[in-house]
Every structure is written in structure tokens, then in C-alpha cells.
């Protein structure tokens, strides 16, 4: 759903500036929260699906990427249908489905480096106030997005290994090795980033050569 | 912050997001019990006050960016004016308090049981007492539910959150035996 999902391409969305896409996503997600009409939400969902499809991803690919959120959505929809009513369930599922598709369209067409640059620009005012270091803050957010699929992947591996040994994993039996493993991987990644000379030095004068290094660049 | 700090903060933020993907158990009126609040406790207990709060801040930033990172695929600026906004913003303080208490309480070497109890207490004060205070005040005054009603609708979740606090403490003790992380 997020991160590590950027696909190369030349679709209109790929060519739109990352900042524009993120601003549009934030506005759309916020607006949809105040829409309670299921017909309007169905239109929004159709538009979102068309946008996700316009990135060049097939319906099958979109379905595969959004399998996790779809499952959550199905459970939530059934719960609302059962505990509240069908109309509420429809509104909730359509709204969240549309937002998930829009977010997918943005993340599928935005590379981590582009995202990092936008975040850095967003954090710049806070940096001028001395609140944070924009480059480091941007790196933290982009790393977090990258870590989500990594955690899911490691969880699956540990569960498979435990099943192979005939172990029935409890929550604790999965959580402890998983957290240890991803913490170690996070440390390794930090060391690798350090080895590449992050953060890039800021040019202090015009004569100083500017580096092309950007946090998150491959 | 060193690059390792950044990486740890990002990782715990990702853990909170990943826990939101675990299918939720629906409870009263469709409000689901999720594991995400356990992620907030874990961030504080494992990383300490400042970095724990920073991890939650990253999650809040992802929500603001419109990404569906909250349980049930919620996200976007709408969440910040919704009924659960107090709980979302309260997470930041919750992780800080849980991390601070963990730092203070678990200062000396003691038995695993004693440390688990200490960390459970830290998780309960931060992740339940402080968090619910934020969430209930928001419900009472911004959603205009009134203090009594806001208290009643929130209190249903306490037993589940106590179980999560115990689990978070158990996980933290074991994880910190395997990986050396300074709380700060």
C-alpha cells in the first residue's frame, strides 16, 4: 500500500510533481471524510480506481498490492453491517476504499527520493525555527514507509520457519524474534547510510562544489 | 540524533503502522480493538521518551500526508478533527510518558519478573492513564459528548489495553535482552 511500491513509468501521474500529488491526496482524503452520500463516494471510488489504473498497473496488480487493506476493509464493512446497518457499511467501505486507491496511485508513481525532497521542503520552516533538521526528519519519514513492507515480509518468514519446525506461534512467539530481527536490520541500514556520507554537507559558499547526494537516493 | 536513532525511530513508527494492518476485532458499535496502541506502548518502552514520542510523531506525519496508516485504513487530515483525534495526538504524550517511566523505573538490574511488572506499570500509566485523559477530554469538549458520556464510551477499551500493556512489557524485556538499545 505504501513504500517500495514505486513503479517506473511515463503516465501523467508519473510526470506530476510529487508535492502536487501529495497535496491533492491530503485534500482528497480530508474531503472524503466529510462526504456521507454513498452515490458521491461511489463516484469518488470509480475516479480513484481510474487514477490507479492510469499509472499503468493492471487491475490484478492493484488487487495484489491492496490485498491487506482490502481484508481490513472487508472485516470493518461486515462489522458495520452487522452492528450498525448496511448503509453505514457501504459509506465506510466506499470512503476508505477510495482513499486506499488514491494513496496507491500516489505511492506507485512517486519514488522515495522525490518524496524525501517534498518532505524536506515541508520541514524547512520548522528547521528555520530551530525545531528540527529537515533532511534528517525527511529521512525518518521515508525510512518508516520503507520499513512497513519489510516488517510484513520478515513476519511471514518467521511464521514459515516456525511452521516448518511444527511450532504454533503465539503472538509473543512471533513478536519477539520479529522485533529483534527488524531492529538489527534497522541498525545495519543506519550504518550503511552513515557509510554513504549522510547527511550531505551543505554548501557554505558559492565556490564549494555541490553534491548530488540526496537522502534516500539509491 | 545519530543515524541509528533515526533508523530506530523510523522502525518503531513502521511497527505501529504494521500493527494497524493486523485485522481488528470489532467491538461495540463498530469501534474495533486494534493492536496499534500496543505499538505506541512498545515505542516508548523500547526506545525511551524522546525517541518513542518521535516515532509516534512520524506516524502522525504519515496520517497528515493522507496515507491510510491507521487501523482500518484511516488517514488524512480529517482524522485530526474526527472523534478519535484526542487519542491520536495523545499517543505522542503516551509514548513519552511510558518511555520516561521505563527509563526511571527499570534503572537497576533486577529479575525478569520485577522488570516486566515495572514496564507494565509504565505502559499502563502512559498508554492508558495519560492517553485516555487526552482522548476523553477531546471527546468531552470538542465532540461535545460531555465528560461522563465520553468516559463511558472510552472505558470499554481498558481491559483490552491492559492486556496490551502486559504484552508490550513482556516483549520489551525479551527484545532488550537480545538487542542493546539505550533509552533516550
Image (tube, rainbow, N blue to C red):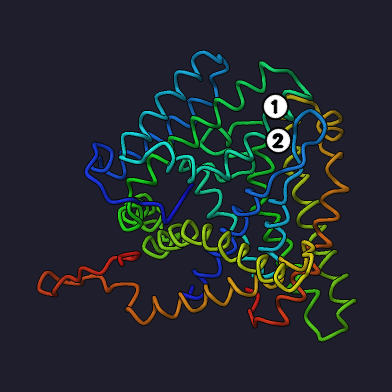
Q: Nearer the viewer, residue B125 or B120?
A: B120
Residues marked 2 and 1 touching at CB (< 8 Å): yes
Is the residue B179 above or below the residue A13 in the image?
Answer: below
Q: Nearer the viewer, residue A48 or B126?
A: A48
Residue B118: x and y in percent read: 85, 71
Q: Mark 2: few, some, or many residues within 10 Å (few <14, many ≥20)?
A: many
* Secondary structure of residue under mark 1: loop
Mark toward the start of the polypeptide (2 vs 1): 2
The chain carrying label 2 is: B
The chain carrying label 1 is: B
State the residue lying farthest toward the bottom: B109
* Secondary structure of residue under mark 2: helix
Residue B120: x and y in percent read: 84, 65
Residue drawn at the location 53% of the way across and 44% of the way down: B63
Apparent side of residue A136 relative to residue B16 in the rendered image (left or right): left
Task: State how far apart marks 2 and 1 are (Cα).
Answer: 7 Å
Where on the picture, by quarter, is residue B78? top right
Residue drawn at the location 64% of the way across and 79% of the way down: B182
Q: Mark 1: few, some, or many residues within 10 Å (few <14, many ≥20)?
A: some
Circle 1 sits on which residue? B143
Is the residue A78 above or below the residue A121 in the image?
Answer: above
Apparent side of residue A208 relative to residue B6 in the rendered image (left or right): left
Residue drawn at the location 58% of the way across and 39% of the way down: B73
Are the residues under badges 2 and 1 in a single subunit? yes
Is the residue B66 above or below the residue B126 in the image?
Answer: above
Residue A197: x and y in percent read: 32, 78
Where on the picture, by quarter, is residue B162? bottom right
Circle 2 sits on which residue? B138
Residue drawn at the location 9% of the way across and 73% of the way down: A207
Q: Nearer the viewer, residue A63 or B55?
A: A63
Q: How many marks?
A: 2
Question: Residue A209: which disc?
Answer: none
Amino acid at each position: 500500500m505504501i513504500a517500495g511500491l514505486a513503479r517506473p513509468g511515463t503516465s501523467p501521474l508519473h510526470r506530476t510533481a510529487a508535492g502536487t500529488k501529495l497535496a491533492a491526496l491530503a485534500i482528497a482524503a480530508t474531503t472524503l471524510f466529510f462526504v456521507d452520500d454513498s452515490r458521491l463516494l461511489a463516484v469518488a471510488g470509480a475516479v480513484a480506481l481510474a487514477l490507479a489504473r492510469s499509472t499503468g498497473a493492471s487491475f490484478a496488480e492493484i488487487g495484489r498490492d491492496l490485498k491487506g487493506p482490502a481484508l481490513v476493509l472487508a472485516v470493518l464493512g461486515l462489522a458495520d453491517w452487522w452492528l450498525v446497518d448496511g448503509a453505514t457499511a457501504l459509506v465506510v467501505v466506499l470512503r476508505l476504499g477510495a482513499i486506499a486507491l488514491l494513496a496507491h496511485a500516489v505511492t506507485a508513481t512517486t519514488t522515495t527520493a522525490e518524496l524525501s525532497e517534498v518532505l524536506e521542503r515541508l520541514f524547512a520552516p520548522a528547521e528555520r525555527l530551530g525545531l528540527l533538521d529537515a533532511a534528517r526528519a525527511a529521512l525518518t519519514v521515508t525510512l518508516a514507509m520503507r520499513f512497513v513492507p519489510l516488517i510484513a515480509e520478515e513476519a511471514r518468514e518467521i511464521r514459515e520457519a516456525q511452521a516448518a519446525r511444527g511450532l504454533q506461534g503465539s503472538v509473543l512467539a512471533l513478536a519477539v524474534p520479529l522485533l529483534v530481527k527488524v531492529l538489527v536490520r534497522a541498525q545495519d541500514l543506519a550504518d550503511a547510510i552513515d557509510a554513504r556520507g549522510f547527511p550531505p554537507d551543505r554548501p557554505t559558499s558559492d565556490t564549494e562544489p555541490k553534491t548530488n547526494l540526496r537522502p534516500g537516493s539509491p | 540524533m545519530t543515524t541509528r536513532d533515526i533508523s530506530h525511530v523510523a522502525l518503531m513508527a513502521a511497527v505501529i503502522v504494521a500493527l494497524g494492518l493486523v485485522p481488528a476485532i470489532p467491538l461495540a458499535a463498530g469501534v474495533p480493538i486494534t493492536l496499534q496502541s500496543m505499538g505506541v506502548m512498545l515505542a516508548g518502552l523500547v526506545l525511551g521518551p524522546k525517541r518513542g514520542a518521535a516515532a509516534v510523531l512520524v506516524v502522525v506525519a504519515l496520517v497528515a500526508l493522507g496515507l491510510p496508516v491507521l487501523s482500518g485504513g484511516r488517514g488524512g487530515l480529517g482524522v485530526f478533527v474526527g472523534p478519535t483525534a484526542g487519542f491520536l495526538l495523545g499517543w505522542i504524550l503516551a509514548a513519552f510518558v511510558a518511555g520516561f517511566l521505563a527509563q526511571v523505573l527499570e534503572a537497576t538490574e533486577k529479575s525478569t519478573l520485577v522488570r516486566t511488572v515495572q514496564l507494565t506499570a509504565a505502559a499502563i500509566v502512559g498508554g492508558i492513564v495519560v492517553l485516555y485523559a487526552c482522548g476523553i477530554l477531546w471527546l468531552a469538549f470538542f465532540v461535545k459528548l460531555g465528560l461522563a458520556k465520553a468516559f463511558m464510551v472510552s472505558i470499554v477499551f481498558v481491559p483490552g489495553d491492559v492486556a496490551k500493556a502486559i504484552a508490550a512489557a513482556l516483549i520489551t524485556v525479551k527484545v532488550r535482552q537480545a538487542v542493546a538499545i539505550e533509552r533516550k
